[in-house]
Amino acid sequence: MLDLPAYDRLDSFKLFMFDTGLLKNMAGIDNAAILLKSDYQFKGPLTENYVLQQIKNQFDVAPRYYSNRYGEIDFIIQYGTDVIPVEAKGGRDKSAPTFKTYIKEHDASLAIRISERGYRREGAITNFPPYLAGRIIDLI
């Protein structure tokens, strides 16, 4: 698959803020809730917003959101002729059935997970801690 913009679906999209701090403030989220509660329900959307901010300027084609009737992939990025799925996790949980199914069905040789699990490679999946999200293009 080449030229991701050609596959855009205008009926399937997500909205993000240009600044995660402003998003947190507009939502009225207290810092203690994010820092002290590992299961805080808004941690996922904040993580996705942060990851988008970090990856959007690293690649020539803007990241895309992907969904089908079975689930969603947080981002799809194009790197040359490769299409790379990206999963952003707010914690250490690595269960992501749609992400793993996408990798298998599309025979993805590289997939990226951003999570608190640290930097590691597990087959096609490379896990990056959030602080390295801004360096993905240098490390893949």
Image (cartoon, rainbow, N blue to C red):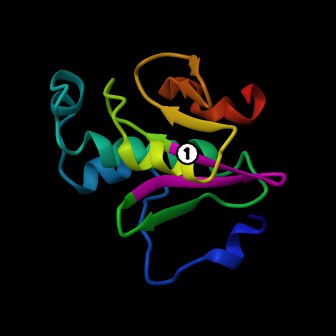
- What's the magenta region? 72-86
Left or right, residue 41 beside residue 124: left
Residue at point 75%, 50% (across, down): 59
Q: Is residue 79 magenta?
A: yes
Q: Is mark 1 on a helix, strand or loop?
A: helix
Tell me the residue that label 1 is attached to: 104
* Residue 43 horizontal/vertical position (percent): 27, 39
The quarter in which the C terminus is drawn is: top right
Residue 97 appears in the picture as rendered:
yes
* Residue 1 horizontal/vertical position (percent): 74, 64
Q: How crowded is mark 1: few (under 14 residues within 10 Å), some or many (20 or more)?
A: few
- Residue type at mark 1 is Lys
Q: Does the magenta stretch include residue 38?
A: no
Residue at point 52%, 51% (across, down): 102
Task: Please name whichever residue, 90 or 6, is drawn nearer the observer in this view of the structure.
Answer: 6
* Residue 49 horizontal/vertical position (percent): 43, 49
Left or right, residue 7 beside residue 117: right
Q: Quadrant of residue 91?
A: top left
